[in-house]
Amino acid sequence: MRSVMLAVGRGWLFGILLGLVLGGGLGTFVVPVVGTVFGGVAGVVVGALAGLPAAVLVAPAALLGPSVFGDRVWPGAVATGAAYLLVTEVVFAGSDMWDGDNFVYLLVLVVIAGALGVCFGGVVVRGVRILSLRTPRVAVCASLVGAAVGAWRVVTLEGLGEPGLLLGVSFLGWIVGGILGSVLIIFNLLVTKEPAAE
């Protein structure tokens, strides 16, 4: 039972960090800086509330032997389902999620949550470190993604007529991406005891 309780704790913390990453990322995409802060704070609160029951669902997999289903598929499925329910019933409650931009937001958030659930399943269930997620290069890659998203958002809204705005938002996206990537790296290093064989 100790392994299950530890898995619940890791899963709950992962839910909070997932809320921070998804909320901050979505907020940056909608309104850079202000949206980042608001989305990150809201994401932490929602992640704390939804992360605990999700962690309780995932944790019993710790009683099973190492397997693709218990360490990857099941955590990914729970993360996907939780993200879907949160987006449709909380974040965009009352909105038509199958139309226009809302569907894009839904798809992106659910896919990212599911992918992170799969990637971090072994971390949550067994406390097994991800070797490829322990170096600063991950944060650098996340920074590049953040800069690209920020630039794309400005171009779609304002075109290329505002180079100062484009540069500023891209820079902010670079910073935010690095911070969110670093959060995942720190989580990976803090809650695990030993590297996984790859």
Image (cartoon, rainbow, N blue to C red):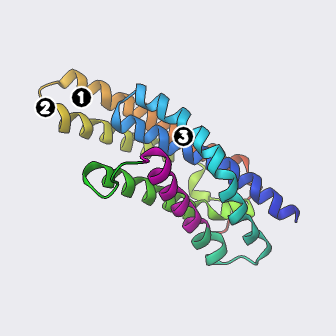
Q: SS of the residue at dot 3?
A: helix
Question: Label 2: few (<14), some or many (≥20) within 10 Å?
Answer: few
The residue drawn where x is 50% and y is 62% is: 114
The residue at the far right in this view is 2
Q: Can see residue 133?
A: yes
Labels 3 & 2 near each other (Cβ < 8 A):
no
Write down the region rendered in magenta.
75-93
Labels 2 & 1 near each other (Cβ < 8 A):
yes
Name the spot of residue 132 as percent of width and height, x first: 56, 57
Q: CA distance from mark 3 to mark 2?
A: 32 Å
Name the spot of residue 157 as percent of width and height, x first: 19, 34
* Circle 3 or circle 2, nearest the eye: 3
Q: Quadrant of the N terminus?
A: bottom right
Q: SS of the residue at dot 2?
A: loop
Magenta highlight on residue 178: no
Residue designated by label 1: 166
